[in-house]
Amino acid sequence: MSRSAKITLTQELDVKVSDVTALADVVHQVDNIGASISSGSFKTLGMVIAPCSMRSLAEIASGVTSSLVTRAADVVLKERRRLVLMVREAPLHLGHLKSMVAATEIGAIVYPPVPAFYARPENLEQMVDHTLGRVLDLFDISTDVVSRWQGLAPADTKESR
């Protein structure tokens, strides 16, 4: 977890950093570039950065990394594993968009956490769960929180109106 992520976490949620790290089996310090995940020999399915700052996005897109988070992402890409970047910024300027293109061109998936309103979420938790479930779909990890699109019902089509 980056320093900025820790700040964001405490400002946006009613949890402490220690609450989140307690959920993990292993926790590495962001400046420990010698951690196991900084090597391609450490096997993973890939990596999700959520949220992904524009700074992290730019570092990953350029291949010039300054923390364990971006170094581990770089390793995931060089090993041709799945990297999902949940970028969260608005509005976007051209530099942001160019970084997104560059990251996509080198193999990352840019996945802004945009709610799927077709799922008809009743609350924020359902919107978040659905988005995270869709991200886990990218790793073939199934959850029961994703409302799958079933297509338009015949009565909902323009032709039937």
Image: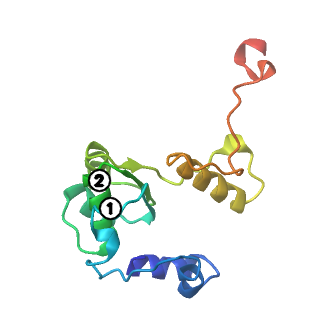
Kind of residue indicated by mark 2: Leu
Per the image, the residue denoted by label 2 is 77
Quick check: marks 2 and 1 in contact, CB under 8 Å? yes
Gap in Å between the C-alphas at discs 2 and 1? 6 Å
* Percent x, y of residue 50: 47, 64
- Neighbourhood count class around disc 1 (C-alpha, 10 Å): few under 14, some 14–19, many 20 upward: many
Per the image, the residue denoted by label 1 is 73
Q: Nearer the viewer, residue 36 or 86?
A: 36
Is residue 129 visible in this depiction of the protein?
A: yes
Tag 1 secondary structure: helix
* Percent x, y of residue 57: 32, 60
Q: Nearer the viewer, residue 41 or 153?
A: 41
User: Is 141 left or right of 76, judged from the image as shown?
Assistant: right
* Percent x, y of residue 40: 28, 61
Above or below residue 13? Residue 52 is: above
Residue visible at 31% across and 77% down?
A: 35
Is residue 90 visible in this depiction of the protein?
A: no
Indicate the quadrant containing the N terminus: top left, top right, bottom left or bottom right. bottom left
* Percent x, y of residue 74: 27, 60
- Colouring mode (rainbow / by chain / secondary structure / one colour): rainbow
Kind of residue indicated by mark 1: Ala
Above or below residue 111? Residue 20 is: below
Residue visible at 68% across and 34% down?
A: 149
